[in-house]
Amino acid sequence: MYGESDVIRRRVSRLREQADDIRASADKLVAQSEAVPWHGRAAESFRGRMKERATALRSAAEQHDRAADTLAKHLKQVDLLKEQIAEVEARAEVLATDGGLDGFEAPEPGHKDWLEVTLR
């Protein structure tokens, strides 16, 4: 069988969780740097650098979100093709039961070659 839908679904979920965790880390970094009790040019430089790091973290989180979105689209396509394969297999089974597929060599169950089968 092609495309392990449950595995892909879990990966999409994990990517989204990671994105949320990364965003939370960015927020925490900024909050902690703002809470530092010292002042002066070095403190402001430190806070500025932490904000830059937080921006980079948020960018990484967005990349995780985009990867999850792309993988979710792929999952939809995988599920659609698996449904189409199952439909052709079911029609072939009905025709074979009725004796309408003499000499037909069926592909392996769930194989993508079912998408190439044309049935009357």
Image (cartoon, rainbow, N blue to C red):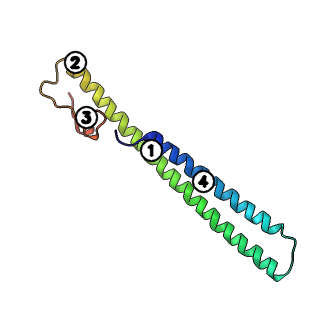
Left or right: 43 with respect to 96? right
Q: Secondary structure at mark 3?
A: loop
Looking at the image, tell me whether mark 3 or mark 2 is earlier in sequence order. 2
Q: Residue 97, which numbered label? A: 2
Q: Dividing the picture into quarters, in which one does residue 60 lie?
A: bottom right
Q: Residue 75, which numbered label? A: 1
Query: Mark 2, residues whose alpha carbon is within 10 Å: few (<14), some, or many (≥20)?
Result: few
Q: CA distance from mark 1 to mark 3?
A: 22 Å
Above or below — where is 41 with respect to 82?
A: below
Q: Quadrant of the N terminus?
A: top left
Viewer-nearest of discs 4 and 2: 4
Q: Amino acid at mark 1?
A: Leu
Dot 4 corresponds to which residue? 18
Q: Position of residue 69 (x, y in %)?
A: 52, 51
Q: Secondary structure at mark 4?
A: helix
Q: Amino acid at mark 4?
A: Gln
Taking the spot 28% from the left edge, 32% from the top edge, the residue there is 109
Q: Residue 37, which numbered label? A: none
Q: CA distance from mark 4 to mark 2?
A: 50 Å
